[in-house]
Amino acid sequence: MNYSGWELKYFDLSHNFRKYQYELIKDHLGKKILEVGPGSGMFAKKFLMKDSNEIHLTEINKDLHELLIDEFQDLKKDVKIFSKKIENIDYTYDTICYFDVIEHIENHENEIKNALNKLNANGKLIIIVPAFNHLYSNYDKSIGHYRRYEKKFFLKFLRDNNLIYKSLFYFDCIGYFFLLMNKLINFKNEKKVSFGTIIWNLMIPVSKILDKMLFHKFGKSLICVIQKKEI
């Protein structure tokens, strides 16, 4: 996985978007949760801990792993922090979350299969990824994205592996147009990108309304919730 420090900083400051993400996934969260690639841990701290007394985080980036330890050391709730790949974790979970992480992993299908092996029966794997390959830009490349995604990838993966999904839809249509503009103009300056991020975040409430009106037909991001079948 590749991470850009300034990318994470501005992403974590996008509180409206983070809140929107949480609203979309909260009904799928179980009691024992693993978040893979949590970065600074802001999402877990602010949102996931509302739903569970047992949160595990795994971050293989050394600097971010140390940051997570500092951020969570004084919390009373049961938070375990690893620096392991998913296949090397010795626990199973009700919910495993990848929020804008899978696109950083070259062998993404193997990662998803390994995550499914760590789910309890009827557990859910929640994946949020950047949407639409035609939006792939120099910005994506600069922050370590191997690809963007469309529904057809997940539908094929589910069909090939005899899996079922609970949710599969696009969201944040305003963000879609911001990214399209960014690709056309090809902003490379961090200040311009960060200014655009601030404006985009302020418009998330509009995106939420339009997403419903447009039946989540497109957006900046794609969410897929896969449920593990009971054996």
Image (cartoon, rainbow, N blue to C red):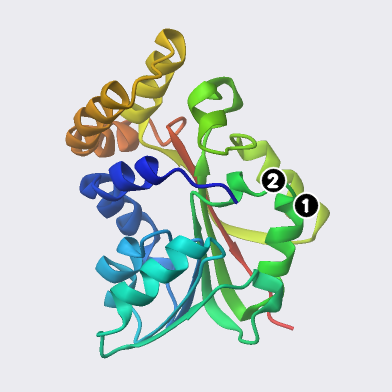
Residue tagged 1: 159
Circles 1 and 2 in contact, beta carbons < 8 Å = yes
Q: Is residue 108 above or below residue 151?
A: below
Residue tagged 2: 155
What residue appears at the point 26 percent right and 54 percent down from the top-left corner?
19
- Name the amino acid type tagged 1: Arg
Question: Judging from the image, what secondary structure is the residue with disc 2 in?
Answer: helix
What residue appears at the point 20 percent right and 28 percent down from the top-left corner?
199
Q: Is residue 228 visible?
A: no
- Measured as percent of width and height from the top left, residue 52 is found at 35, 82
Q: Quadrant of residue 55?
A: bottom left
Q: Quadrant of residue 124?
A: bottom right
Q: Is residue 114 above or below residue 177?
A: below
Q: Is residue 97 above or below residue 180?
A: below
Question: Judging from the image, what secondary structure is the residue with disc 1 in?
Answer: helix
What residue appears at the point 36 percent right and 61 percent down from the top-left corner?
40
What residue appears at the point 43 percent right and 33 percent down from the top-left corner?
220
Q: Quadrant of residue 91?
A: bottom right
